[in-house]
């Protein structure tokens, strides 16, 4: 084992970088090949049961509505990253307290992230 480490240490920087890149590529290929347990209409598999996109969207919407019900005047919005257009539009509908400046889109986006 020490021979291997001695040999790797004696390689120049460029060769070590190429060797490391090759090992990472092989590792990524092995990890990618192990996947494939989720069909195209699913988002996850839990205990061999597929969670479909339709079920996921249903429960995501239900959670958003439940969260909105806790905030007075809050509208339900499902996260729509990376732009968060729906979330920003929903937050713009909420009233701004008097005496405070109206937030900009960037401020709303930070709250949505």
Image: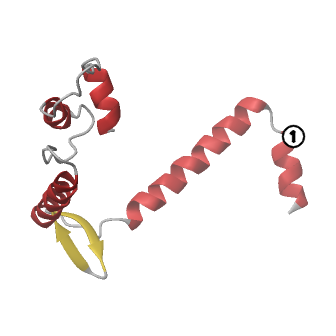
Q: How many marks?
A: 1
Q: Position of residue 19 (x, y in %)?
A: 66, 43
- Farthest residue to the bottom: give it: 47
Q: Residues within 10 Å of mark 1 (few under 14, many from 20)?
A: few
Q: Is residue 106 above or below residue 94?
A: above
Which sits in the foreground, 88 or 20?
88
Indicate left or right for 18 with 90 as reference.
Answer: right
Q: Position of residue 81 (x, y in %)?
A: 25, 39
Where residue 102 sits, quadrant-wise, is top left
Q: Secondary structure at mark 1?
A: helix
Picture residue at 89% right of the left edge, 49% below the top: 6
Indicate left or right for 106 with 52 as reference.
Answer: right
Residue under pointer 1: 10
Where residue 106 sits, quadrant-wise, is top left
- Screen quadrant of the C terminus: top left
Q: Is residue 36 above or below residue 4?
A: below
Q: Position of residue 35 (x, y in %)?
A: 36, 65
Indicate left or right for 37 with 6 as reference.
Answer: left
Which sits in the foreground, 96 or 40?
96
Which sits in the foreground, 60 or 43?
60
Query: Which of the colour schemes (rainbow, by chain, secondary structure, one colour) is used?
Result: secondary structure
- Screen quadrant of the N terminus: bottom right
Picture residue at 19% right of the left edge, 37% below the top: 87
Picture residue at 39% right of the left edge, 62% below the top: 33
Q: Is residue 73 above or below residue 12?
A: below
């Amino acid at each position: 084992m020490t021979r291997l480490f001695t040999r790797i240490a004696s390689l120049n920087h460029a060769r070590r970088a190429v060797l490391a890149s090759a090992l990472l590529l092989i590792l990524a290929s092995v990890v990618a090949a192990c996947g494939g347990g989720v069909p195209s209409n699913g988002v996850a598999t839990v205990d061999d049961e597929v969670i479909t996109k339709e079920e996921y969207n249903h429960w995501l919407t239900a959670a958003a509505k439940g969260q909105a019900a806790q905030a007075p005047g809050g509208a339900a919005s499902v996260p729509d990253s990376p732009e968060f257009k729906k979330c920003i539009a929903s937050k713009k509908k909420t009233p701004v307290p008097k005496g405070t400046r109206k937030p900009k889109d960037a401020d709303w986006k930070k709250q949505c992230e």
